[in-house]
Image (cartoon, rainbow, N blue to C red):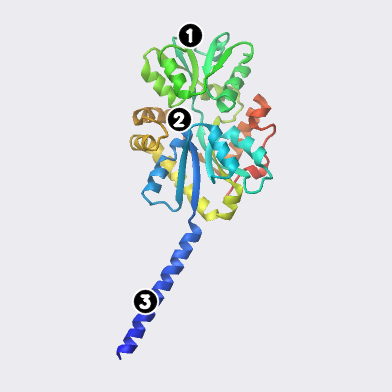
Amino acid sequence: MKNKSLRSLILIILSVMTALSLFTGCSSEEAGEIRITTLKGPTGMGMSKLMEDNEAKTTANIYTFTAASSPDEVTAALGSGSVDVAALPINLAAKLYTKLHGVEGKEIQIAAINTLGVLYVLENGNTINSVADLKGKKIYATGQGSTPEYILRYILSKNNIDPDKDVTIVYEADHATLATMVGAGKADIAMLPEPNVTAALSASENVRIALSLTDEWNKVSSGASLVQGCIVVRKEFAEKNPKAFSKFLDEYKASVEYVNGSPEEASLLIEKFGIIPKAAVAKKALPNCNICFIEGSEMKSMSEKVLNVYLEADTSSVGGALPGEDFYFSR
């Protein structure tokens, strides 16, 4: 009798262990380890809640995050295949698509738009009230070779201002350095992205926002929304890990919604993960950062339109030609 009871107990234990192993196996197939690189600044702000959840081990996947200071760091990581997912300017995504197309394991796709317009023209003074007022002026700027340069040149050109002859554009390598120059009165007119706009405004009461380049873009772009940042994925990774990548997109979307809906709490996370140095600046800047999550057919349509505009402004801005249909990820 005792032996029969013991055998029954063993069978029950084995059955439970088998069920658990099957459950765990299913879980591990659907979850995944995903290496993510994001840019510091607005492009990375929407990722902050996901980074916090990952640290708390409450996410569906296991994420490894890196916050990069420059787009070059992100493109280098994608080019080496050392990351699976990255947040970067949309024109650089197009250039990388062309560069890596046909390279096994390194081809990329755009999966979502995550940042719309974040650029503003600041002035120490009150002489710039329209794009026309920039003619003959010296404009300090950042983002040479990336979306800020092409946006500025396009808007100037569409307002009959030759960006090579009618204005002098002086590029600084670092957003924070230029924001400090503006705040100190060492740059009268400057184009900067958020949150550096907020930093400059906080440094001096003489500094004001003269122009929103999103508004100026909308006036001349024939319905092409100003898209600046996006999420890209290695095509091979997305194909081999469809469920894990789909879960990432869902969790990232939820993170963006949290950041937009809870700026006070989100700003603390943005500082914690080094995306922006100060929570107070992040909180003030968030309303002007246009963080979003747009995927699918809407993402494709918006991306095609804006890349066409960048191509018109400068063919090299998107790698010489528009990306093919396989550039666009769809789940």
Residue projecting furthest to the left: 2
Percent across and percent down for residue 144 are 57, 24
Residue 172 % position (x, y): 52, 20
Q: Residues within 10 Å of mark 3 (few under 14, many from 20)?
A: few
Left or right for 305, reference 85: right
Q: Earlier in the sequence, mark 2 or mark 1?
A: 1
Callout 2, which amino acid? Cys
Q: Residues within 10 Å of mark 2 (few under 14, many from 20)?
A: many
- In the image, what residue type sits under mark 1? Thr
Assign a secondary structure to mark 3.
Answer: helix
Residue identified by numbered label 1? 127
Is 95 left or right of 143, judged from the image as shown? Answer: right
Specify the quadrant of the image occupied by residue 4. Answer: bottom left
Q: CA distance from mark 2 to mark 1?
A: 25 Å
Report crowding for label 1: few under 14, some 14 to 19, many 20 or more residues within 10 A (C-alpha): few
Determine which residue is flagged by label 2.
289
- 108 horizontally vs 215: left or right: right
Q: Residue at x 66, y 48 (%)?
A: 104
**Labelled disc at residue 149:** none
Q: Earlier in the sequence, mark 1 or mark 3?
A: 3
Report if the CB atoms under discs 3 and 2 are less than 8 Å apart.
no
Numbered circle sitting on residue 13: 3
| Quarter residue 194 falls in | top left
* Quadrant into which the N terminus falls: bottom left
CA gap between label 1 and label 3 equals: 80 Å
**Location of residue 178 in the rendering, given as x and y in whole percent from the top left corner:** 47, 19
Identify the secondary structure beneath mark 1: loop
- 1 vs 3, front mark: 3
Element type at mark 2? loop
Disc nearer the start of the sequence (3/2): 3
